[in-house]
Amino acid sequence: MSSNLKIPKICEFCKNTFIARTTRTRYCSHTCNSRAYKAAEKQVIVDKIKTQTEASLTGDLVKIKAMEYLNVDQAALLFGISRRTIYRLVNKGCLNVAKFGRRTVLRRADMESLFSLPITTEIDQPVQEFEGIESCYSISEVQKKFNVSPAALYNLLQQYGIAKYAIGRYTYVAKRDINLLFNANGL
C-alpha cells in the first residue's frame, strides 16, 4: 500500500528541508539516519565515561576527607591546588611535613588551618600624597648633598618607610623626611 502523502519536514540531523512520504520520517536520507544513530551511540559512551570518572573522583575525595594524614597528591586534590603550590608552602615554612623515605606526608588539620587564615600579603601602609616638586629632593640631589651612595640611600628609604615619588625620569623624596633622616636643620 503506497502513500500519496507529501509532507515538508526538516531533517533532525542536517537541518535541511525535505519532502517526507510518511508522518514518522525524521531524516532526509539513509546517510543522515546513520550519522544520527552513530552520534547518539557516541554520546551514550561519552556520558558513561563521564559518570565513571566523576564517581572515581568523588570516591577518592570521600576517602581522602576521612584520612588524617595526606600525601602531596591527595592534599592537592582535596584543596584544589597544585603540587608545586604545596611544596612552595612547605619551603616557606607555612606547612609542616614528615618524610618517610621519598614520601612526603602532611596533616590534613594543618592544611585546613592554613586555608582558614585570612591571606595578607603586605601590611597596608597609608599612602602619602605628593607634596610638590618644590618641597622635594631628587635622589641625585640627596646623594650629593648628604654624600651617600645610591645603595645606602635606597636601603635607608626602605628601612624607614620613606615614600618615593616617580615623576617622569626622576624619583623624588620629601625634603622634611630626608632632613629628619639625616638630622639636617633646613640646610
Image (cartoon, rainbow, N blue to C red):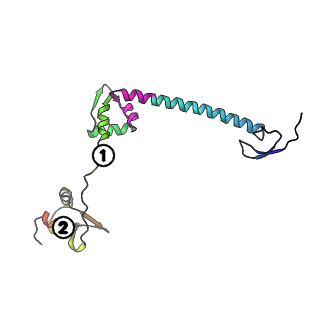
On screen, 29 above or below 153? Answer: above
- Name the side, left or right, on which 90 lies relative to 21: left
Q: Is residue 134 magenta?
A: no
Residue 165 seen from this side = yes
On screen, 101 above or below 186? Answer: above
Q: Using a 10 Å C-alpha cutoff, classify the residue at mark 2 as few (fewer than 14 neighbours), some (14 to 19) or many (20 or more).
A: many
Residue depth check, mark 2 versus mark 1: number of the one nearer the observer: 1
* Residue found 21% across the figure and 57% down from its top: 158
* Residue found 40% across the figure and 26% down from its top: 63
Label 1: element kind = loop
Q: Which mark is residue 28?
A: none
**Majority secondary structure of magenta residues:** helix
User: Residue 147: percent from the left, percent from the top?
Assistant: 15, 65
Q: Quadrant of residue 46?
A: top right
Going from N to C along the chain, the mark reached first, 2 or 1, is 1
User: Residue 65: percent from the left, percent from the top?
Assistant: 38, 29
Q: Nearer the viewer, residue 22 or 141?
A: 22
Q: Nearer the viewer, residue 85 or 11?
A: 11
**For the residues bearing labels 2 and 1, Cβ distance under 8 angstroms:** no
Q: Quadrant of residue 133?
A: bottom left
Q: Read off the magenta span.
A: 59-81
User: Residue 162: percent from the left, percent from the top?
Assistant: 20, 61
Q: Is residue 67 magenta?
A: yes
* Residue found 50% across the figure and 32% down from its top: 54
Which quadrant: the N terminus?
Answer: top right
Q: Amino acid at mark 2?
A: Val
Q: Using a 10 Å C-alpha cutoff, classify the residue at mark 1 as few (fewer than 14 neighbours), some (14 to 19) or many (20 or more).
A: few
Q: Pointer 2: what residue? A: 142
Label 2: element kind = helix
Residue 187 seen from this side = no
Q: Pointer 1: what residue? A: 119
